Amino acid sequence: MASSTAMLVIDMQNDFILPDAPMRVDGGEAIVSNVIKAVSVARERGILVIWVVREHDRAGRDVELFRRHLYASGNGPTTKGTKGAELIDGLVPKEGEYKLVKTRFSAFFDTHLNSLLQSNGIKSLVVVGVQTPNCIRQTVFDAVALNYLPVTVIVDATAAKTPEVHAGI
């Protein structure tokens, strides 16, 4: 029997995690091992793993207006096909898992995620990745609005720029 839960691994990409990354989330590197563990447990339990990534056009035509300036040189963050857009070392999708490309904070906004989840009988979600106040929060809010229950955030497998921001202080 297939699981009715899916795990969303959000934005665990080089341009968000590496020490010299242009969009570095300071707490991101510290959670990599916990994300790897969470993905391993999900796989053991038969939970569908969905790799949610940002990939943008080299010219930034599909990026938010407030970030367009980052693409003026033709080499902005998480540009499709670049090393920065790749998943961080240690995170490797397996056959049967799914990669979903997004261009905004929420994994649901202007993507087919909801249809994918529904067609696979998914009722509940587990969320890991970066960054808590933006992509994690917006995806969780949209998941709740779309009636996924429960929506679980693994706190030590998500991160933000600072521990205070991550904790919502």
Image: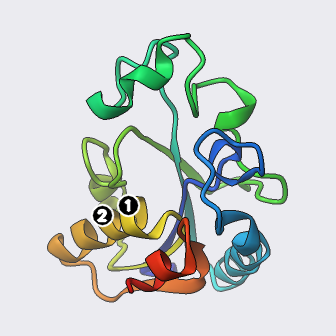
Which residue is at the front of the view, 10 or 96?
10
Left/right placement of residue 153 relative to residue 149 reads: right
Looking at the picture, the colour scheme in use is rainbow
Find residue 69 and report its horizontal and vertical position in percent.
41, 21
Left/right placement of residue 153 relative to residue 113 reads: right
Find residue 123 and report its horizontal and vertical position in percent.
32, 79
The residue drawn where x is 69% and y is 25% is 82
Q: Secondary structure at mark 2?
A: helix
Residue 148: image quadrant is bottom left
What number of labels is visible?
A: 2
Q: Residue furthest right?
A: 90
Residue at the disc numbered 1: 134
Q: Mark yes or no: residue 64 visible.
A: no
Residue 90: image quadrant is bottom right
Q: Is residue 103 above or below residue 94?
A: above
The residue drawn where x is 71% and y is 45% is 14
Find residue 164 and report its horizontal and vertical position in percent.
49, 81
Pointers 2 and 1 in contact (CB under 8 A)?
yes
What's the residue type where badge 2 is placed? Gln
Residue 32: image quadrant is bottom right
Left/right placement of residue 5 relative to residue 29 reads: left
The residue drawn where x is 79% and y is 74% is 33
Find residue 111 and report its horizontal and vertical position in percent.
31, 43
